Image: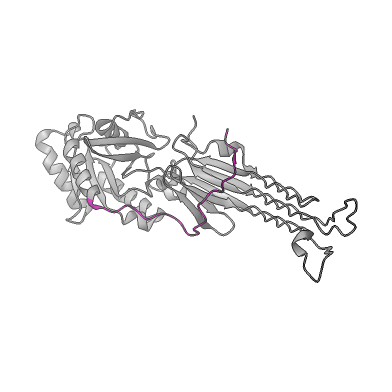
Amino acid sequence: MKFIDEAKIFVAAGDGGNGVVSFRREKYEPEGGPDGGDGGRGGSVRAIADRNVNTLVEYRYTRKFKAPRGENGASAGCYGRGGKDVLLRVPVGTVVTDLGTRRVVADLAHDGQAVLLARGGKGGLGNIRFKSSTNRTPRRCTKGEPGEQRELLLELRVLADVGLLGLPNAGKSTFLRAVSAARPKVADYPFTTLSPGLGVVRVAEDKSFVVADIPGLIEGAAEGAGLGIRFLRHLARTRVLLHIVDLAPLDPEADPVRDARAIAGELEKFSPELAARPRWLVLNKLDLIAEDERRRRVEDFLRAYGAPEETPFFPISALSGDGCRSLVFALQVALDELPFPPAIVDDPQENLFPDDQWTIQQK
């Protein structure tokens, strides 16, 4: 299935049904009185996070979702039937933003978490509601309220504890294969990874964490070079970033220090908040460097790069697995102490479903 992590949709709740003016007309009861019922409420549009849904591909082809209106009231005190709610199933990790106000409506980070996207209109009142001791024959009713309408942006941000950052072919996917059971595609050409991937790293029987691998960045990504920075959103929930640096590039003109600084600069342009997260240096491809030169190569890089002394660094070979085990254990220790990022919500909404049946508009 094609990986889709962004979609724009239009949602419209149903209008409320109208109330009616009606009077009883029964034999031998000339003064029957008002009996016009209320209109039903319009259906609402809601979204729910479903762990069985992986991408937003369905919302690239079906973009409009409208709930039915409520039925009008009727005579004999009959109330109109309410419109059924529309339920949209989205992947866990979806962020919903109102394009009109640019406010985040919901951050659906847990399976089963639900949010109201558009509220159905209330039903109008029938004339039975206006009966009183001084007005026994009311000829008044009200129309149903219109349902809410919204244009929304759905963004999928994968749930991961650790994010991999670096140039194409720095060894991110190879590292993910080395520490988890994930099998992303690896090859000796740039942009092998075209969509984000996840791997579960099991440290002990009861301890594990999730690593996110995203397509590599290049200098100028913020201006659209390469695959751009659109996939950096998938690092927004991570607690630790691993900046994987190729210490033995095949291109003789490549400079690992310059490339590492370029990646750090692109991250800063995308999100200063994300750039401030703990970022560890992972110096990869030691297997391509002679053993007697490895220590000097690592020290030269750290000196030229100018990383703060407290920045953790790990020389590894993702291909052979050397150094990966100690890195994984250090990550688990750090993750046990680091808090989770706060939810991304600007506009908290009612989160409860009504008791009536929902209409699922996801095929």
Q: Is residue 209 above or below residue 187?
A: below
Residue 251 seen from this side = no
Quadrant where the image shows the C terminus: top right
Q: Is residue 295 above or below residue 144?
A: above
Q: Quadrant of residue 251?
A: top left
Q: Is residue 349 left or right of residue 251?
A: right
Q: Position of residue 212 (x, y in %)?
A: 34, 40
Depth check: give the residue in front, 188 or 319.
Answer: 319
Q: Identify the residue at horizontal 30%, vertical 37% (top origin).
A: 172
Give the percent coordinates (x, y) of residue 218: 38, 44
Name the side, left or right, on which 289 lies relative to 30: left
Identify the residue at image location x=43%, y=50%.
Answer: 222
Residue 94: x %, y % from top left: 47, 45
Nearer to the camera, 30 or 116: 30
**Residue 359 part of the magenta segment:** yes
The number of numbered discs placed on residues in the rendered structure image is 0
Tell me where the magenta segment starts and ends, as one range.
337-363
Residue 165, quarter of picture: top left
Q: Residue furthest front?
A: 28
Quick one: 232 or 8, which is closer to the camera? 8
Majority SS type along the magenta span:
loop
| Above or below for 180 versus 32 | above
Point 21% across, 40% down: residue: 328
222 in the magenta segment: no
Return the residue found at the far bottom. 134
Query: Where is 142 relative to 155, above or below?
Result: below
- Rendered residue at 23%/30% (across/down): 319
